[in-house]
Image: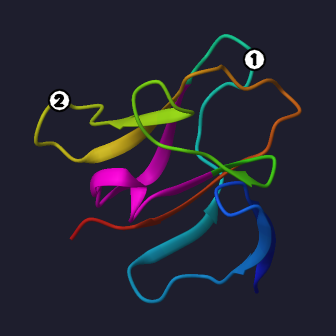
Amino acid sequence: MPVLIFNPIEGIFEFVNEPGEGGVAGEEPTGAKNGVNKDFTTADFFIHEVAGRSVKVYLNGVRQNEGVGCDYTVTESGGVGTGYDTIVFDVAPIAIDLILVDYWKRA
């Protein structure tokens, strides 16, 4: 089912459809939303490409920007080469925040 989100980069609202096979849409990653914790983990390892081309993170319906000094970065919780599975926010989300992630599973 398509979800309406705001794309702040282009300043428009757009519908996001669920990805095809191997894709995950609208997953709420695990992690404490307490204003302190910044790390949230996806259920599966995901493919990471430069500039967030394969991972999309939404906070309260607004797409976030990836990169150092931006809204979030991604890491490999098991160390280099183990697979990306963690989103690290620049500002820690609070209890009322809704975090959703779209990504492609790593084979």
Amino acid, disc 1? Asn
How far across and how far down the image is residue 45, in percent? 32, 54
Range of residues picked out in magenta: 39-57
How far across and how far down the image is residue 93, in percent? 72, 26
| 27 shown above or below 73 | below
Between 8 and 73, the one nearer to me in the picture: 8
Amino acid, disc 2? Gly
* Placement of the N terminus among the 4 image quadrants: bottom right
Q: Residues within 10 Å of mark 1 (few under 14, many from 20)?
A: few
| 49 shown above or below 1 | above
From the image, tell me which residue sits under label 1: 34
* C-alpha distance separating marks 2 and 1: 25 Å
Drawn side of residue 3 relative to residue 43, left or right: right
Q: Residue at coordinates 66% horizontally, 10% vertically from top-left?
A: 36
Image label count: 2
Q: Residue at coordinates 17% horizontally, 29% vertically from top-left?
A: 79
Which image quadrant is residue 92 in?
top right
Residue reaching furthest to the left: 81
